[in-house]
Amino acid sequence: MASRAQQLGASFDVLIEIDTGGRRGGLPPGDPGLVELGTLISSLGPALRLEGVLTHAGHSYHARTIEEIQAIAEDERQGAVRSAERLRAAGLQCRTVSIGSTPTMVHAKSLEGVTEIRPGVYTFFDIDQMAIGACAIEDIAVSVLASVIGHNRRAGRVLIDAGGLALSKDISAAEFRKDVGYGWVCPVDGSGPIPDVWVADVHQEHGLVASTKEHPPWDSLPIGGRVRILPNHVCMTVAPYGQYYVVDGGDEIVATWSKATGW
């Protein structure tokens, strides 16, 4: 990193990742290598500057109760703060203490010692967050507009023009609910999900809507009609799109927002 910074004529602010239970990456808060790594980064100035520590309690997505999420949130906070204190005690700079997943930031009881939070899904919320109690269904702010393009009465499926590319193939909410599939189907008028109906399967460009009843509500989902699909994991769903069409309590577009896309 220092070599690349020198090549660019730049300097990088560096945060050390801390593993507070997610086991994705980083050092545990008590790892002896933490201070060693901080010292190494600081010795490579001015190309590198030790800015602080960060962590992400992604395992909170699998918690079953609010109390469990709260316990993970406190582990997340304590682990990051403890790591920062160890670096400071060694005479190293640690200005930033950065934590955050959406469930833990919604339910955390304390943020003492934290300087920054980084929840992402909270911006829009989704069915997965609703399933673990981080939001209510009316808090979900993004849906995918789709058209009904066919009735397969033999198979008991309504075809829509939104498949895996439009919705993503993330079925994270299925860990908590069995009636979710690839998203819930809502009327275009902004009201809540149509009872007993969901996107049961997806192909690349097609979604197959099913019902827990004997057959889907054909009349409520006429060919040529439009529906909104609430996503399982909104981050994955919105990623390919170039912009957001904004509505406010109805179906009239009141604004268009550009967005970051691509890599």
Image (cartoon, rainbow, N blue to C red):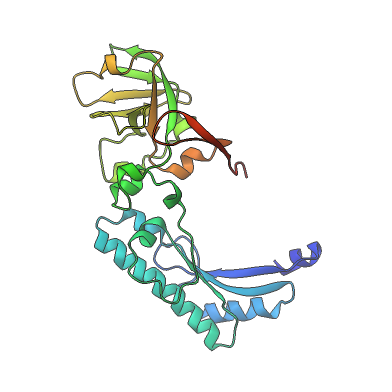
Q: Name which residue lies at 50% across and 78% down.
A: 84
Q: Name which residue lies at 76% across and 66% down.
A: 10
Residue 224 in the image, given as x and y percentages of width and height: 41, 14
Residue 169 in the image, given as x and y percentages of width and height: 43, 36
Residue 140 in the image, given as x and y percentages of width and height: 37, 43
For residue 3, which quarter of the picture?
Answer: bottom right
Q: Name which residue lies at 57% across and 76% down.
A: 95
Q: Which image quarter holds the N terminus?
A: bottom right
Q: Which image quarter holds the C terminus?
A: top right
Front residue of this view, candidates 73 and 16: 73
Q: In this view, does 65 lie to the left or right of 257?
A: left
Residue 229 in the image, given as x and y percentages of width and height: 38, 31
Q: Does residue 30 show up?
A: no
Front residue of this view, candidates 183 and 5: 183
Vertical arrangement, residue 106 with respect to residue 191, above or below: below
Front residue of this view, candidates 49 and 145: 145
Q: Does residue 83 show up?
A: yes
| Total residue callouts | 0
Vertical arrangement, residue 152 with respect to residue 179, above or below: above
